[in-house]
Image (spheres, rainbow, N blue to C red):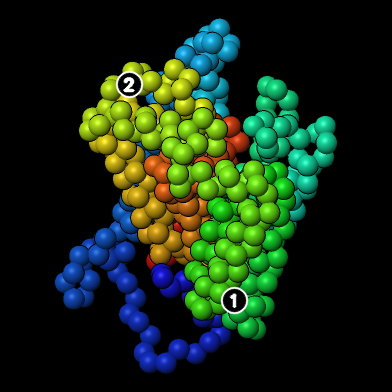
Amino acid sequence: MVAPPQSPPSRGSKRPGRAAPKTSLGQRRGGRSAAGATTAPASVSRGGNFWLLITLVGVLCMIGVVMVFSASSITSLQLFGSPWHYLVREWIWLALGWAGLFVASKVHHSVWRRITPVFMWGSVALLVVVLVPGVGVSAGGATRWIGTSTVQIQPSELAKLALVFFAADVLDRRAGRGPWLYQAAPVLSVLALVGALVMVQPDMGTTMVVAVVAASMLFAAGIPGRWMMGMGACAVIGAFGLAKASPYRWRRITAFLHPFAHPYNSGYQSVEGLVALSNGHLVGDGIGASLASYGYLPNAQTDFIFAVIGEETGLVGGLFVSGLFATLVLVGVRIAAKAPTRYAYLLATGITAWIASQAVINIGAVVGIFPVTGVPLPFVSFGGSALVISLFGVGVLANIAKNPRA
């Protein structure tokens, strides 16, 4: 675990030993230290993580544009009479998302701390509104959206970012004050509230993501590992009980274990995803040549976009996209390690855990090691509120990268 940055001593505090010699102008600009070692200018470390983060996300977004069009053009032609329907919407959501990323990267990350309570409780209110009959929009047996047939937002996506801001604020303010439960109690309470509202929709995938985000931030804040393991065990037992209580939910969750036993109902999507991946072999069938894009694979442009990538670009393309996400997570860890304050450190940890957990859950579901939960692949799946809010979160992470610890 990366140690969080400590707050600087107050001006009035006495420091033992002699005062450090003043740094010369040449050293500040990247000259040589007294020991003869070359010191890099601050702009080098500042720009490295920032531009690497932006480049990785940009490449993933461009891959997403190509694959969304390839996976949806035939379905779009059948449903809307035009192959461009999903592609045009994808560009619109991307434009909004990158505008949000630009703004968030320019605004200092500490500014968002001031509106954290409004942000957090506003997202909780929207989660409640979704459940109001006649207000929430239902699809595929779940009620997760609000809006019209033209524009819809998913409040649970907003709740992910709100939880990151809330947990970073609380864990920073309560650091070193009282026992660990005093520090963690507000985060655990909000996690339970958000998790319950999301599960009612139902949306087990998002519940898993917010749980991983909260656990990662608690661990990064220094909550004892044995208590984290105990709470994790209780959460697993509770999730098992909720799944077992509903026969439909239990069949859907366990279908990934033996998908070919029920290839025409609960295991259909998993089977088609595995078939698509197997058809890709090493280098794939080529962009636009997948059978999955002809309607055999449900939600090909959203939840199962990775299966289309595997079929059209093969093992090479699948490993390349997975490698991009792995590198993105490593960059997020580096940004957190160089964060200027404890609050920024926790913020970067939460955003990185959010992107990492969502990518792992999505890819894991497609390759058959996790249940199918409906979690989109960040920056690659067909856009909407998930794409816009994820890019905004990357903008906050980029701002932290622009202001590293000295």
- First along the sequence among labels 2 and 1: 1
In the depicted structure, whether residue 143 falls above or below residue 17: above
Residue at 66% in and 66% down:
188
Can residue 228 be seen by looking at this rendering?
no
Q: Which of 296 and 356 is in front in this view?
A: 296
Residue at 48% in and 60% down:
349
The quarter holding residue 337 reads bottom left
**Residue of label 2:** 287
In the displayed image of the protein, which residue is found farthest to the right? Answer: 133
What's the mark number on residue 175?
1
Mark nearer the viewer, 2 or 1: 2
Is 29 left, or right, of 393 in this rendering? Answer: left
Place of residue 58 in the rendered image (x, y in percent of width and height, measured from the top left): 40, 36
Residue type, numbered disc 2: Ile
In the depicted structure, whether residue 116 falls above or below residue 391: below
In the displayed image of the protein, which residue is found farthest to the bottom? Answer: 16
The C terminus: image quadrant: bottom left
In the depicted structure, whether residue 390 falls above or below residue 331: above
Place of residue 63 in the rendered image (x, y in percent of width and height, measured from the top left): 38, 30
- Neighbour tally class for label 1: few under 14, some 14-19, many 20 plus, Cα within 10 Å: some
Can residue 372 be seen by looking at this rendering?
yes
Q: How far apart in space, not on screen, are marks 2 and 1 (Cα)?
A: 51 Å
Q: Is mark 2 on a helix, strand or loop?
A: loop
Residue at 65% in and 47% down:
247
Q: Do the residues labelled 2 and 1 touch (CB within 8 Å)?
A: no
In the displayed image of the protein, which residue is found farthest to the top? Answer: 81
Residue type, numbered disc 1: Ala
Residue at 78% in and 46% down:
128
Q: Nearer the viewer, residue 215 or 48?
A: 215
